[in-house]
Protein backbone atom coordinates (compact mmCIF):
# COMPACT_ATOMS: atom_id res chain seq x y z
CA UNK A 1 0.00 0.00 0.00
CA UNK A 2 1.26 3.51 -0.55
CA UNK A 3 1.87 6.11 2.14
CA UNK A 4 -0.77 8.54 0.92
CA UNK A 5 -3.81 6.35 1.52
CA UNK A 6 -3.77 4.46 4.81
CA UNK A 7 -4.57 0.79 4.44
CA UNK A 8 -7.97 -0.35 5.56
CA UNK A 9 -9.49 -3.77 5.43
CA UNK A 10 -11.45 -4.13 2.21
CA UNK A 11 -15.18 -4.51 2.66
CA UNK A 12 -16.58 -7.84 1.58
CA UNK A 13 -17.40 -7.72 -2.12
CA UNK A 14 -21.08 -7.43 -2.91
CA UNK A 15 -22.61 -10.74 -3.90
CA UNK A 16 -22.85 -10.75 -7.70
CA UNK A 17 -25.94 -12.98 -7.62
CA UNK A 18 -28.88 -11.21 -9.18
CA UNK A 19 -26.70 -8.50 -10.75
CA UNK A 20 -27.68 -6.89 -14.03
CA UNK A 21 -25.41 -7.85 -16.95
CA UNK A 22 -23.57 -4.51 -16.72
CA UNK A 23 -23.08 -4.81 -12.96
CA UNK A 24 -21.85 -8.38 -13.51
CA UNK A 25 -19.15 -6.88 -15.76
CA UNK A 26 -18.27 -4.42 -12.99
CA UNK A 27 -18.07 -7.23 -10.40
CA UNK A 28 -15.78 -9.18 -12.75
CA UNK A 29 -13.47 -6.18 -13.24
CA UNK A 30 -13.41 -5.52 -9.49
CA UNK A 31 -12.66 -9.18 -8.73
CA UNK A 32 -9.65 -8.99 -11.05
CA UNK A 33 -8.44 -5.70 -9.51
CA UNK A 34 -9.64 -5.86 -5.89
CA UNK A 35 -7.10 -3.34 -4.57
CA UNK A 36 -7.86 -0.72 -7.25
CA UNK A 37 -10.67 1.73 -7.81
CA UNK A 38 -12.45 0.57 -10.97
CA UNK A 39 -13.01 3.50 -13.38
CA UNK A 40 -15.84 1.88 -15.37
CA UNK A 41 -16.83 3.33 -18.77
CA UNK A 42 -20.58 3.78 -19.19
CA UNK A 43 -21.20 5.62 -22.45
CA UNK A 44 -20.06 9.22 -22.03
CA UNK A 45 -19.04 8.75 -18.39
CA UNK A 46 -16.64 6.83 -16.19
CA UNK A 47 -18.42 5.58 -13.11
CA UNK A 48 -17.29 4.13 -9.81
CA UNK A 49 -19.57 1.96 -7.68
CA UNK A 50 -19.99 0.78 -4.10
CA UNK A 51 -16.96 1.44 -1.84
CA UNK A 52 -14.92 2.76 -4.81
CA UNK A 53 -17.51 5.50 -5.33
CA UNK A 54 -17.44 6.56 -1.67
CA UNK A 55 -13.62 6.65 -1.59
CA UNK A 56 -13.33 8.64 -4.83
CA UNK A 57 -16.06 11.10 -3.85
CA UNK A 58 -14.41 11.81 -0.50
CA UNK A 59 -10.90 12.08 -1.97
CA UNK A 60 -11.50 14.33 -4.97
CA UNK A 61 -14.78 16.05 -4.21
CA UNK A 62 -17.11 14.51 -6.77
CA UNK A 63 -20.77 13.90 -6.01
CA UNK A 64 -21.74 10.61 -4.42
CA UNK A 65 -25.15 9.47 -5.56
CA UNK A 66 -26.68 6.11 -6.43
CA UNK A 67 -27.62 4.14 -9.53
CA UNK A 68 -30.27 1.49 -9.26
CA UNK A 69 -30.28 -1.19 -6.60
CA UNK A 70 -28.45 -4.41 -5.89
CA UNK A 71 -29.57 -6.95 -3.30
CA UNK A 72 -32.37 -4.57 -2.37
CA UNK A 73 -30.07 -1.65 -1.54
CA UNK A 74 -29.13 1.48 -3.53
CA UNK A 75 -25.81 1.16 -5.39
CA UNK A 76 -23.48 4.04 -4.38
CA UNK A 77 -22.16 5.69 -7.56
CA UNK A 78 -19.88 8.56 -8.49
CA UNK A 79 -19.06 9.50 -12.06
CA UNK A 80 -17.13 11.90 -14.25
CA UNK A 81 -17.59 12.87 -17.91
CA UNK A 82 -15.39 10.86 -20.27
CA UNK A 83 -14.06 14.04 -21.90
CA UNK A 84 -12.58 15.08 -18.51
CA UNK A 85 -11.55 11.60 -17.35
CA UNK A 86 -7.79 12.13 -17.51
CA UNK A 87 -8.01 15.14 -15.17
CA UNK A 88 -10.01 13.14 -12.63
CA UNK A 89 -7.75 10.13 -13.05
CA UNK A 90 -4.77 12.40 -12.26
CA UNK A 91 -6.54 13.63 -9.11
CA UNK A 92 -7.17 10.06 -7.96
CA UNK A 93 -3.54 9.12 -8.58
CA UNK A 94 -2.31 12.22 -6.72
CA UNK A 95 -4.60 11.19 -3.85
CA UNK A 96 -2.68 7.90 -3.71
CA UNK A 97 -5.11 5.49 -5.34
CA UNK A 98 -4.45 2.65 -7.74
CA UNK A 99 -7.00 2.91 -10.57
CA UNK A 100 -8.07 0.21 -13.03
CA UNK A 101 -9.53 1.76 -16.19
CA UNK A 102 -12.29 -0.45 -17.61
CA UNK A 103 -13.15 0.60 -21.17
CA UNK A 104 -15.95 -0.27 -23.56
CA UNK A 105 -14.37 -2.59 -26.12
CA UNK A 106 -17.07 -2.02 -28.73
CA UNK A 107 -19.78 0.50 -29.46
CA UNK A 108 -23.46 -0.21 -28.70
CA UNK A 109 -24.24 -0.85 -32.39
CA UNK A 110 -21.70 -3.69 -32.44
CA UNK A 111 -23.28 -5.16 -29.31
CA UNK A 112 -26.75 -4.97 -30.88
CA UNK A 113 -25.50 -6.95 -33.89
CA UNK A 114 -24.67 -9.76 -31.47
CA UNK A 115 -28.27 -9.75 -30.21
CA UNK A 116 -30.99 -7.49 -28.88
CA UNK A 117 -30.02 -8.06 -25.25
CA UNK A 118 -26.25 -8.10 -25.76
CA UNK A 119 -24.23 -5.92 -23.43
CA UNK A 120 -21.32 -3.79 -24.65
CA UNK A 121 -18.10 -5.68 -23.96
CA UNK A 122 -15.82 -4.07 -21.37
CA UNK A 123 -12.36 -4.88 -20.08
CA UNK A 124 -9.64 -3.37 -17.92
CA UNK A 125 -7.17 -1.84 -20.37
CA UNK A 126 -4.73 -0.20 -17.96
CA UNK A 127 -3.94 0.01 -14.29
CA UNK A 128 -2.41 3.26 -13.07
CA UNK A 129 -0.71 3.77 -9.70
CA UNK A 130 1.25 6.66 -8.19
CA UNK A 131 4.43 4.60 -8.65
CA UNK A 132 3.90 3.56 -12.26
CA UNK A 133 2.89 6.77 -13.99
CA UNK A 134 4.36 7.19 -17.44
CA UNK A 135 1.58 9.08 -19.24
CA UNK A 136 2.64 12.68 -19.90
CA UNK A 137 -0.82 13.97 -19.03
CA UNK A 138 -0.68 12.41 -15.57
CA UNK A 139 2.88 13.33 -14.62
CA UNK A 140 3.39 16.48 -12.56
CA UNK A 141 5.43 18.79 -14.80
CA UNK A 142 6.30 21.05 -11.83
CA UNK A 143 8.12 18.37 -9.86
CA UNK A 144 10.31 15.34 -10.12
CA UNK A 145 8.74 12.13 -11.36
CA UNK A 146 11.29 9.59 -10.18
CA UNK A 147 11.19 5.84 -9.96
CA UNK A 148 13.92 4.13 -7.96
CA UNK A 149 15.13 0.62 -7.25
CA UNK A 150 17.49 -0.64 -4.55
CA UNK A 151 19.46 -3.89 -4.56
CA UNK A 152 21.49 -5.22 -1.61
CA UNK A 153 24.25 -7.75 -2.25
CA UNK A 154 27.59 -8.63 -0.68
CA UNK A 155 27.81 -5.66 1.67
CA UNK A 156 26.88 -3.16 -1.03
CA UNK A 157 23.72 -1.30 -1.94
CA UNK A 158 23.02 -0.27 -5.50
CA UNK A 159 20.46 2.43 -6.19
CA UNK A 160 19.16 3.24 -9.66
CA UNK A 161 16.64 5.93 -10.45
CA UNK A 162 15.02 7.34 -13.54
CA UNK A 163 13.34 10.72 -13.96
CA UNK A 164 10.30 9.90 -16.08
CA UNK A 165 9.82 13.43 -17.40
CA UNK A 166 13.33 13.81 -18.79
CA UNK A 167 14.65 10.26 -19.10
CA UNK A 168 17.63 11.06 -16.85
CA UNK A 169 19.08 7.92 -15.21
CA UNK A 170 21.27 7.89 -12.09
CA UNK A 171 23.07 4.94 -10.50
CA UNK A 172 25.01 4.72 -7.25
CA UNK A 173 26.74 1.88 -5.40
CA UNK A 174 27.69 2.27 -1.73
CA UNK A 175 29.07 0.02 0.99
CA UNK A 176 26.59 -0.83 3.72
Image (cartoon, grey):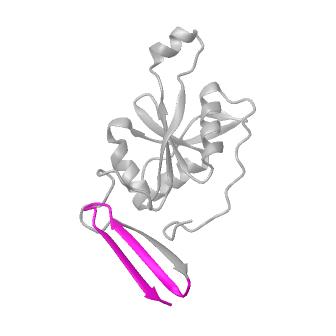
In which quarter of the view is residue 145 placed? bottom left
Q: Which residue is farthest front?
A: 154
Answer whether residue 101 is magenta in the image: no
Q: Position of residue 151 (x, y in %)?
A: 51, 75
Q: Nearer the viewer, residue 3 or 79?
A: 3
| Left or right relative to 109: residue 81 | left
**Residue found 38% across the figure and 80% down from its top:** 172
Q: Nearer the viewer, residue 154 or 14?
A: 154
Q: Quarter-wise, where is residue 143 in the image?
A: bottom left
Residue name at image x 47 percent, y 56 percent: 129
x%, y% of residue 150?
48, 75
State which quarter of the image contains the N terminus.
bottom right
Q: Which residues are magenta?
A: 154-176
Residue at the far bottom: name it. Answer: 176
Q: Relative to the observer, which residue lies in front, 120 or 13?
A: 120
The residue under the point 53% across, 30% down is 122
Q: Quadrant of residue 166?
A: bottom left
Q: Residue at x 56, y 68 (%)?
A: 6
Q: Position of residue 59 (x, y in %)?
A: 46, 58
Q: How many marks?
A: 0
Magenta segment, prevailing SS (helix, strand or loop)? strand
Could you tell me residue 173's position as x and y percent?
42, 82
Q: Is residue 112 above or below residue 127?
A: above
| Residue 170 magenta-highlighted | yes
Q: Of 115 and 67, which appears nearest the observer?
A: 115
Q: Is residue 123 above or below residue 31?
A: above
Amino acid sequence: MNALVPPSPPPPPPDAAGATPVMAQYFDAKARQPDALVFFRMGDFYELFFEDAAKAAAAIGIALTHRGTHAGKPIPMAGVPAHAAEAYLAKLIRAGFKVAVCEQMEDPAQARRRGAKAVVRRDVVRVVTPGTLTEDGLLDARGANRLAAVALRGGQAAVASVELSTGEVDCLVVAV
